[in-house]
Image: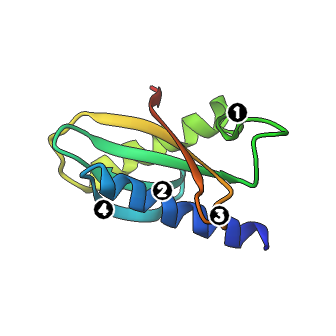
Amino acid sequence: MEKREIGNLGEDTAAEHLRSKGCRILERNFSCRFGEADIIATDSEYLIFAEVKSRKSSRFAEAREFVDRKKQEKIILTAKYYLMKHDYDLPVRFDVIEIYDASGDKPRIEHIENAFE
């Protein structure tokens, strides 16, 4: 399976995970000149910008380790741009959702809420 296919499966799995927690998906792969947000969702309390990281396993490293400070800054700028264009009266939360073995029968999901600010 190619890297992009794994990424798409991971994002599908993450979106379904958020829905199962009562979230409404607003955007997927929102892109602007500052960067990209994999998933933008809302629940009753937060506007959530979720970065999805899909890996076959965590043997090499935890997926969250690939959301470094530079990546976080791009996501934050993307969120600021999104908020300029859309009117939401909710606090913002930045999550990382790790998906391991997305193509398997039971992918492992690690959802880190408030992963960064």
Q: Which residue is mark 1?
A: 65
Q: Which callout, 1 or 4, points to the residue nearer the camera?
A: 1
Query: Dot 1: within a 10 Å radius of its alpha carbon, few (fewer than 14), some, or many (20 or more) residues?
Result: few
Find the distance from the CA under tag 1 to the CA under tag 2.
18 Å
Tag 1: amino acid = Glu
Please tell me the numbered disc located at residue 7.
Answer: 3
Tag 2: amino acid = Ala
Find the distance from the CA under tag 3 to the CA under tag 2.
10 Å
Earlier residue among tags 4 and 2 = 2
Earlier residue among tags 3 and 2 = 3
Find the distance from the CA under tag 1 to the CA under tag 3.
16 Å
Find the distance from the CA under tag 4 to the CA under tag 2.
13 Å
- Image location of residue 99, percent across then percent down: 60, 51
Q: Is residue 52 left or right of residue 18?
A: right
Q: Quadrant of the C terminus?
A: top left
Query: Dot 3: within a 10 Å radius of its alpha carbon, few (fewer than 14), some, or many (20 or more) residues?
Result: some
Q: Residue at x 36, y 53 (%)?
A: 18
Find the distance from the CA under tag 3 to the CA under tag 4.
19 Å
Q: Which residue is mark 4?
A: 26
Earlier residue among tags 1 and 2 = 2
Q: Identify whether 108 is placed above or below 73.
A: below
Q: Contact (CB < 8 A) between labels 4 and 2?
A: no
Q: Which residue is mark 2?
A: 14
Tag 4: amino acid = Leu
In this view of the protein, can residue 6 be seen by the observer?
yes
Earlier residue among tags 1 and 3 = 3
**SS at mark 3 in the image:** helix
Q: Identify whether 47 is placed above or below 5.
A: above
**Looking at the image, which residue sits at the far top?**
117
Earlier residue among tags 1 and 4 = 4
